[in-house]
């Protein structure tokens, strides 16, 4: 008994380790700092907000008021920082420059930030995944690759907000045969078609694979490039047999720019500015004298020069192999969160707020936050991650009332993924009336929003 108490006391003196200095990881750090908690913020890259820097040219469809963590903004305000206009829409670059970099430089966070610290693995000290005895009292071991070599950091809790990695092109979830060999002609994400990467795509035949908002942004830029650069052509391949409901809720979307993005994408397809191929499930990429040929189940596409993979993301779970996680077998999200976001059953695109209860794992003190917590589901909004961070940090400090309280109402998308009706639209009911913020109850979170 005495030894257990000693271990518990030792563990309580250790820091909370936050993995990933993107928007959600920085928000978690801000909440830990505000509550006087010891923490370390580990970032694998040489600068904070690394993911946003890769799409710095893209304008977000959510305005600033949904991209600022309220407490973080309050901390910054005390230093003289002036918040951007609430209804303005930042680019990825503006998000970094006007918010993430000032937040990382805040005196409550900067001393605890470690750049170029890549987390290789997380485990329990002295216990592999199999051993149960004394597990909950043992500190976490975070193995980190630093500029000076590998080291282990002990932590009393771990918040993993490290984001996600791009999905491969293959329709089976595996890289297409030939994909790895052709990576130098494949861009994963949203290339800066009209700026930094213009020469790569001007006058070229480009295939875009994927059916989400990232694909919309790429397609719209490529169509503009084609109008300016002769010889540029755009092909769009999607796995779905129909795009009904995929262009969003239009005027019904409570984020108007998100609705307009879908409408613009639909317009370029209807105008024939993009060659659309539906029901295409890519299995192989072949290099021929005429270009890259994407081979699907039963047929091939015309040769192209470049491919853009806008196929979504998945979590990198390899560093967490020695932890006991409770992940949904379909989405790879925490099991309590999965029913709220599973695109196979989720009847609308809006995800209700959620907190530590939905994010818990059998490994006490470990949480996945942000995009990584959503597994393979694509419905993440930044402000959702901030609410996760607020609730989880409150739980880690024993403030259960704050941890269970919902402090966020999210905008409805106006789009549903239900059965397609005769008019080609996805069937959907009207959004339910918004309740006042209440404690998260199992009965409330058991169903989708509409």
Image: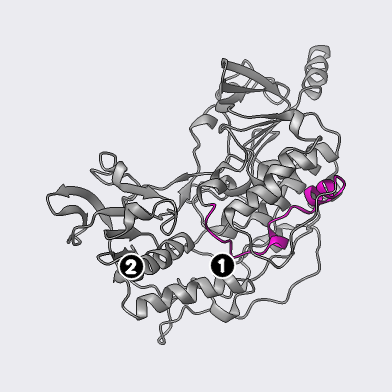
Is residue 208 part of the magenta span, yes or no?
A: no
- Give the residue pinned by disc 2: 226
Look at the image and tell me whether residue 418 can be seen. no
Residue at screen point 27% across, 60% down: 203
Give the quadrant of residue 31: top right
Q: Which one is in front, 80 or 239? A: 80
Residue 133 is situated, as x and y percent measured from the top left of the image, at 66, 20
Is residue 56 or residue 235 the one in the foreground? 56
Asked whether the viewer can see residue 411, the reply is: yes
Disc sitting over residue 369 in the figure: none
Quarter of the image where one finds residue 422: bottom left
Label 2: how many residues lie within 10 Å, few (<14), some (14-19) or many (20+)? many
Q: Position of residue 177 (x, y in %)?
A: 24, 44
Secondary element at image label 1 = loop
Q: Nearer the viewer, residue 81 or 1?
A: 81
Depth check, mark 2 against mark 1: the one in front is: 2
- 2 or 1: tag closer to the N-terminus: 2
- Give the vertical position of 415 relative to 188 (above or below): below
Residue at the extreme bottom: 423
Q: Is residue 242 left or right of residue 404?
A: left
Q: How many numbered marks appear? A: 2
Which quadrant holds the C terminus? bottom right
Whether residue 67 is in magenta: the answer is yes
Vertical placement of residue 409 versus 403, above or below: below
Q: Residues within 10 Å of mark 1 (few under 14, many from 20)?
A: many
Under tag 2, what secondary structure?
A: helix
**Magenta-highlighted residues:** 56-79
Q: Which residue is mark 1?
A: 349
């Amino acid at each position: 008994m005495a030894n257990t108490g000693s271990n518990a006391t030792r563990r309580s003196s250790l820091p909370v380790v936050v993995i990933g200095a993107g928007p959600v990881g920085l928000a978690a750090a801000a909440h830990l700092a505000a509550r006087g908690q010891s923490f370390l913020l580990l970032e694998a890259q040489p600068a904070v907000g690394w993911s946003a820097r890769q799409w710095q040219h893209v304008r977000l469809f959510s305005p600033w008021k949904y991209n600022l963590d309220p407490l973080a903004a309050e901390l910054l305000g005390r230093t003289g920082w002036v918040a951007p206009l609430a209804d303005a829409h930042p680019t990825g670059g503006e998000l970094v420059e006007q918010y993430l970099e000032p937040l990382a430089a805040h005196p409550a966070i900067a001393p605890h930030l470690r750049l170029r610290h890549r987390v290789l693995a997380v485990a329990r000290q002295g216990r592999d995944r199999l051993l149960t005895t004394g597990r909950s009292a043992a500190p976490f071991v975070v193995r980190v690759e630093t500029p000076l070599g590998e080291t282990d950091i002990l932590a009393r809790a771990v918040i993993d907000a490290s984001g996600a990695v791009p999905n491969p092109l293959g329709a089976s979830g595996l890289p297409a045969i030939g994909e790895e060999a052709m990576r130098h002609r494949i861009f994963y994400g949203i290339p800066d078609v009209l700026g930094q990467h213009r020469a790569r795509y001007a006058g070229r035949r480009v295939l875009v694979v994927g059916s989400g908002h990232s694909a919309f942004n790429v397609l719209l830029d490529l169509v503009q490039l084609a109008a300016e650069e002769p010889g540029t052509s755009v092909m769009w391949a999607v796995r779905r047999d129909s795009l009904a409901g995929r262009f969003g809720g239009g005027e019904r979307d409570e984020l108007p720019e998100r609705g307009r993005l879908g409408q613009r994408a639909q317009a370029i397809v209807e105008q024939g500015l993009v060659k659309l191929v539906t029901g295409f499930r890519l299995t192989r990429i072949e290099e021929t004298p005429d270009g890259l040929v994407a081979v699907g189940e039963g047929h091939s596409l015309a040769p192209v020069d470049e491919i853009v993979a806008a196929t979504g993301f998945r979590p990198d779970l390899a560093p967490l192999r020695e932890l006991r996680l409770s992940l949904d077998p379909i989405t790879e999200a925490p099991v309590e969160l999965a029913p709220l976001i599973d695109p196979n059953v989720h009847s609308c695109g809006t995800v209700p707020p959620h907190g530590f209860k939905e994010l818990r794992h059998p490994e006490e003190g470990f949480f996945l936050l942000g995009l990584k917590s959503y597994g393979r589901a694509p419905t993440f909004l930044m402000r959702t991650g901030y609410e996760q961070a607020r609730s989880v940090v409150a739980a880690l400090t024993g403030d259960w009332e704050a941890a269970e309280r919902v402090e966020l109402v999210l905008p409805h998308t106006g789009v549903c993924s239900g059965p397609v009706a005769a008019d080609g639209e996805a069937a959907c009911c009207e959004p339910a009336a918004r309740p006042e913020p209440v404690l998260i109850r199992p009965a409330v979170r058991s169903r989708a929003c509409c």
